[in-house]
Image: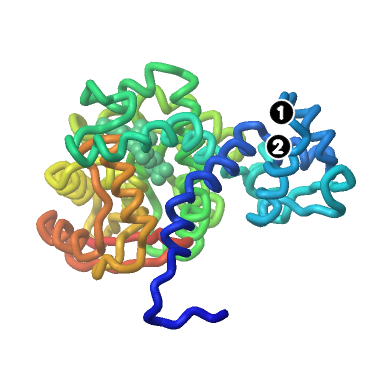
């Protein structure tokens, strides 16, 4: 029966309220590398999956796990229960097979290993305004994470996963014809610089980040065969100048910090640009009415969990800060899904 517009329904309440069940099923499949193993073998029965993943549960548990993934659209299935044969869908084959360069599961691995547990303390975060991650009792989030080589690798992979589509879109949509050089501030594994150099053969890029990240960026640049036009530089963007360039990019950087530091970083970018140069922030920019981009709002709460004082923002906020920093004009370039490039011209 069709629901009347003014009739109450518990449907949405239950869907969102149980959302962590769905999320945890996907995150567990990624952490087991189920999609990678399925890509290697093309198809598997539930019995094969049980054996390959060394699951010690009942066959019924395995059917439930795999059939839920099928209903979500992450697996295809022929047959049922003990006659079922499972394979990846086009999405999971493309984006969740670890052996493909298009793998974006790094962010999901980090969601499973770190954020799932930390989000359990969202209430405490809201009550105290304090971060709820490893840095619960310390100010230096990046210093703490980067002390552990495994966490450093996991964090940079996660950043690559979440921003890959946006970087590819930005490299192709933004007009680079007037520019020759770009610096990506907080560039992590260097993917933004790599994408820009790949799609714009006249561009020379520098990926700038904290010293522990530099070897990871150099290895990625080498993998793409772009060492002649993509370089790295390292340092602390608060205590030292950032390299001069025609385009200064910050992807998911401003949202890590409070308003005062956001403005300080935009002023620093302004100082590194020539007249006519562009400052670009690539983030889940929230719509000015705060009615649509729920991903941006959830990411902002994620910044409470991760940094305590960081937050995501609207284009109107960006315009206000661009004005304070001295920029002449701004524009918003939509990228993939909820993400955009907020651009300020000097
Ligand atoms: C949230 S990640 C974003 C990475 C990447 N730009 C992206 O869009 O996925 C923030 C990055 O800023 C870097 N970072 C944090 N504090 C920094 C500092 N003081 N100086 C330079 N880089 C810093 C981190 O190492 C990390 O790579």
Residue 155 appears in the figure: yes
The residue where tag 1 is placed is: 57
Helix, strand or loop for disc 2: helix
| Figure check: 295 above or below 212 | below
| Residue occupying image coordinates x 31% and y 22% | 143
The picture quadrant where one finds residue 137 is: top left
Q: Are marks 2 and 1 in contact (CB under 8 Å)?
A: yes
Helix, strand or loop for disc 1: loop
Residue 337: give its label: none
The picture quadrant where one finds residue 48 is: top right
Using a 10 Å C-alpha cutoff, classify the residue at mark 1 as few (fewer than 14 neighbours), some (14 to 19) or many (20 or more): few
Colour setup of the view: rainbow
Residue 61: give its label: 2
Q: Is residue 73 left or right of residue 121?
A: right
| Residue occupying image coordinates x 85% and y 47% | 85
| Figure check: 16 above or below 130 | below
Q: Where the C terminus falls, by quadrant?
A: bottom left
Is the CB atom of the residue marked by disc 2 within 8 angstroms of ligand 1's nearest atom? no
Specify the quarter for ligand 1: top left
Separation of marks 2 and 1 at Cα, in angstroms:
6 Å
């Amino acid at each position: 029966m069709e629901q009347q517009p003014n009739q109450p329904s518990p449907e949405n309440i239950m869907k969102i309220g149980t959302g962590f069940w769905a999320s945890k099923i996907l995150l567990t499949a990624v952490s087991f590398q189920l999609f990678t193993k399925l890509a290697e073998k093309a198809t598997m029965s539930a019995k094969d999956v049980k054996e390959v993943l060394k699951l010690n549960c009942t066959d019924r548990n395995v059917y439930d796990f795999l059939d839920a993934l099928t209903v979500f659209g992450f697996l295809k299935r022929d047959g049922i229960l003990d006659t079922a044969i499972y394979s990846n869908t086009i999405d999971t084959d493309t984006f969740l097979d670890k052996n493909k360069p298009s793998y974006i599961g790094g962010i999901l691995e980090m969601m499973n290993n770190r954020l799932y547990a930390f989000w359990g303390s969202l209430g405490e975060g809201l009550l105290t305004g304090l971060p709820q991650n490893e840095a619960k009792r310390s100010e230096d989030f990046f210093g703490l994470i980067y002390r552990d080589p495994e966490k450093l690798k996991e964090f940079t992979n996660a950043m690559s996963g979440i921003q890959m589509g946006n970087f590819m879109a930005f490299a192709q949509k933004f007009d680079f014809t007037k520019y020759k050089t770009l610096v990506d501030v907080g560039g992590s594994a260097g993917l933004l610089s790599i994408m820009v150099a790949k799609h714009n053969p006249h561009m020379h890029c520098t990926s700038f980040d904290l010293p522990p990240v530099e070897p990871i960026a150099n290895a990625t640049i080498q993998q793409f065969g772009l060492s002649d036009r993509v370089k790295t530089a390292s340092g602390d963007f608060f205590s030292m100048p950032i390299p001069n360039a025609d385009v200064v990019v910050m992807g998911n950087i401003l949202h890590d910090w409070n308003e005062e530091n956001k403005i300080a970083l935009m002023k620093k970018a302004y100082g590194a640009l020539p007249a006519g140069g562009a400052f670009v922030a690539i983030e889940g920019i929230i719509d000015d009415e705060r009615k649509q981009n729920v991903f941006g709002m959830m990411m902002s709460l994620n910044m409470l969990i991760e940094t305590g004082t960081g937050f995501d923002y609207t284009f109107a906020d960006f315009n206000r800060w661009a004005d304070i920093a001295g920029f002449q004009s701004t524009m918003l370039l939509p990228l993939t899904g909820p993400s955009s490039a907020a651009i300020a011209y000097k």
